[in-house]
Amino acid sequence: MEIVAVFLLGLASGMVSAISTGGGLISVPGLILLGSSPVTAIATTRLSALSSGLTSSYRYYKKHKIIWRYTPYLIIVSLAAGLIGPKLLFKIDEQALEPLIGLILLLLVPTLLHDKKLGLVSRQKSRSKKLHGLFVLFVIMIYGTMIGAGGGIFLIYALMYFFGTNVTQATATGTVMWLAGTLVALVTYINQGAVDFSIGIPLLIGAAIGGSIGAKIALKKGTAWVKIVLIGVITAASIKLLLF
């Protein structure tokens, strides 16, 4: 019964991650509810993040939604962050950090609602703004590989704001970036013995299927629909991090 529950958890988190990111807000609390420690839950969900990222990236790749000219720089930033984030997890109280992250997420909603075109159309951005964006993404990926919950949402917003992508391009390109950091972080967590493969494997399989389904839905519905879902996920994520 637990294996089935974990599989369904992976399926749901994989779908959400592929559409608007935020799957960790489902998988991490879900694993904790099933009896895992917070560190084990965070470490083990790197497996599902990897599998859902691979399957959703493949669908986005086929539809030419990944902006490849940015990926070399994004991957370098992500790899560097992936070396730092997991080490910090073992040194901080993630529960003390979550309310602050929830508050910051909540502040993103008015911006998305006020700027009607943000995430719906691609925009040209200056080189200096993109350089600032790389630093912001580095900080985001440190948090993302350390705790994960809500990190993907910040990633998408940063790609839209600093690089001028639409929301679908941000999700597709951000997934590739997320994969690099996740892979490095996963190796660290495995070396630390923090990954529980008995639940990680069914979680991985469910997330792989969910990632493929989620990306297919996002591509079919279009950017306007994805932006609405993103706003909904941000609102739900902020409430979860602030109140639970």
Image (cartoon, rainbow, N blue to C red):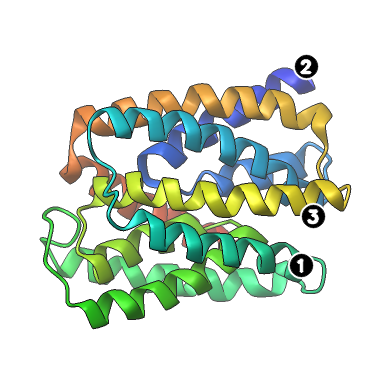
Q: Amino acid at mark 3?
A: Val
Residue drawn at x 70%, y 48% as measured from the top left? 186
Q: Nearer the viewer, residue 40 or 228?
A: 40
Viewer-side label of 3, 1: 1
Residue 98: x and y in percent read 62, 68
Residue drawn at x 48%, y 74% as measured from the top left? 103
- Residues at marks 2 and 3, CA–CA distance in whole angstroms: 23 Å
Check the picture and name the quadrant holding the C terminus. bottom right
Q: Please say whether residue 87 is visible from this viewpoint.
A: yes
Residue at the disc numbered 2: 1
Residue at the disc numbered 1: 87
Residue drawn at x 31%, y 25% as measured from the top left? 216
- Residues at marks 2 and 1, CA–CA distance in whole angstroms: 33 Å
The disc placed on residue 39 is 3
Look at the numbered discs 3 and 1 and tell me whether their residues touch, using CB distance below 8 Å: no
Q: Amino acid at mark 2?
A: Met
Residue farthest to the right, as pictured: 193
**Res 30 → quadrant:** top right
Does 42 sit above or below residue 101? above
